Image (cartoon, grey):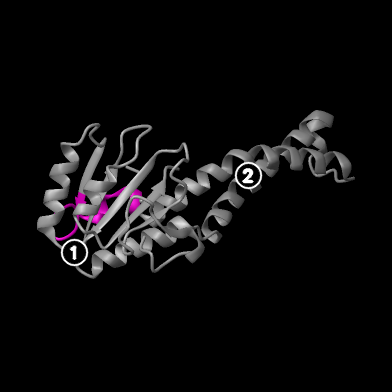
Amino acid sequence: MKCSDPSSGNPAALRPHPGLPDASLWSFGDRNESVALCVVVVLDDRKRLATLKERLAAADPAPLQLLSIGQGEADIAGVERLDPTASRRRRQRSMVRWLLPFGFLAGLTFTQITDLHTFDALGSWGQPVVGGLLGMISGWMGSFAAAASVASEEDDRIRSLRNRLDEGNWLLLVEPAAGTEPPWPLIQQARPRAVIRLGES
């Protein structure tokens, strides 16, 4: 499963959704973006949560996934998409794709342009290759450091959602069908405290 509170994150990233006139409902990102979206609806009443879930399940097209989170529902600890650690792992995997080849080329080039002979025993070809491999290791280690040091807006939104849950609210995770938007009128009728969405990684 791949989803803030309008009180957190960058205020410039928050704006009222055109289909939701209620000022307490907010949307993140561009509605026309091509990436899939996960929508989180924050509700302070469990009955409205159940009603909304039933109506969304009956919508056409139906969402790919509906997940209720909160007291008496699913535990947020088991939802990977709302786990900041999982988000950091995704960033690390994304960074390592370009840091590994960059590290190899950097190590290879450094070995060629310097007058170091640390691995002379490996010959004229073996020495630069070993330098490239050491560069790859450095790039791999760097991906962990970079992922841990970068605080994304998505992390802020996830933390805000977890805070909402601690305040006694419920969350409804909605994954719309591919190429579609969630049924905003149905969501508005549930009078949610907030509507939050995250782009798919």
Q: Residue at x 70, y 38 (%)?
A: 104
| Residue 72 can be seen, yes or no | no
**Number of residue marks:** 2
Which residue is tagged 1? 44
51 to 136, vertically: above or below: below
Q: Residue at 32% across / 54% down in the picture?
A: 20
Quarter placement of the C terminus: top left
Q: Residues within 10 Å of mark 1 (few under 14, many from 20)?
A: some
Residue 157 found in image quarter: bottom left
Q: Residue at x 22, y 43 (%)?
A: 66
Left or right relative to 114: residue 157: left
Q: Is residue 179 left or right of residue 12?
A: left
Secondary structure beneath label 1: loop
In the rendered image, residue 199, in percent from the top left (x then y), is placed at: 43, 45
N-term-proximal mark, 1 vs 2 = 1
Q: Is residue 109 magenta?
A: no
| 18 or 128: nearer the viewer | 18
Measuring from the top left, give residue 33's x and y in whole percent.
47, 40
Q: Is residue 35 above or below residue 18?
A: above
Camera-nearest label, 1 or 2: 1
- The answer to whether any part of residue 18 appears in the image is yes
Quarter of the image that includes the N terminus: top left
Q: Tag 2, which secondary structure?
A: helix
Question: Three-letter amino acid code at disc 1?
Answer: Asp
Percent of width and height locating residue 18: 38, 52
- Residue in the foreground of this view, choosing between 43 and 92: 43
Amino acid at circle 2: Ile
User: Where does the magenta region start and end?
Assistant: 68-82
> Which of the numbered marks, if any, corresponds to residue 137?
2
How many angstroms separate mark 1 from mark 2 (CA)? 49 Å
